[in-house]
Image (cartoon, rainbow, N blue to C red):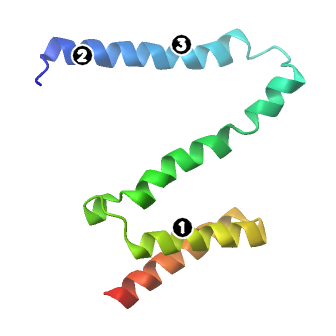
Amino acid sequence: MTLSTATIWTIILLLGLGTWLLRFSFIGLIGDRKLPGWVLRHLRYTPVAVMPGLIAPLILWPRATGGQPDAARLAAAAAALAIGLWTRNVVASVFGGMGVLYLVQYLTG
């Protein structure tokens, strides 16, 4: 399926407008108002919901292996999760996962 240049630019502009409207709805319309407690409580979970969506494809279908899962990334993810649960420290979790990734890649060649 090939798209014309005009179609591509229309899609880009509409997606940009949609992104701007979503941000404006929070920043411009309700940015200076006090939000109810239940909204603030739900907004606390936004990073927790977004991060797995960003990280999971990199672990399960990494580009470096042609989209095939590999032991090094799965071990690094498990180590990062375990370190994060044990220490409650994001930096320790990140560096621990990186260390396990590089160690397993080194050991497996």
Compared with 73, 23 (above or below) is above
Percent of width and height locating residue 107: 39, 90
Amino acid at circle 3: Leu
Q: Distance between the residues labelled 2 and 1?
A: 38 Å
Q: Would residue 64 appear left or right of 42 to someone viewing this image? A: left
The residue beneath circle 2 is: 9
Q: Would residue 27 appear left or right of 66 to someone viewing this image? A: right
Q: Distance between the residues labelled 2 and 3?
A: 18 Å
Q: Quadrant of the N terminus?
A: top left
Mark 3 lies on a secondary structure that is helix
Q: Would residue 100 appear left or right of 48 to someone viewing this image? A: left
Q: How far apart are marks 3 and 1 (CA)?
A: 35 Å
Compared with 66, 21 (above or below) is above
Amino acid at circle 2: Trp
Q: Would residue 61 appear left or right of 5 to someone viewing this image? A: right
Q: Mark 3 or mark 1: which comes first in sequence?
A: 3
Q: Can residue 23 be seen in this view?
A: yes
Q: Are marks 3 and 1 in contact (CB under 8 Å)?
A: no
Q: Which of 32 and 108 is in front in this view?
A: 108
Q: Mark 2 or mark 1: which comes first in sequence?
A: 2
Mark 1 lies on a secondary structure that is helix
Q: Quadrant of the C terminus?
A: bottom left
Q: Which of 65 and 13 is in front in this view?
A: 65
Mark 2 lies on a secondary structure that is helix
The residue beneath circle 1 is: 77
Q: Is residue 95 visible?
A: no
The residue beneath circle 3 is: 21
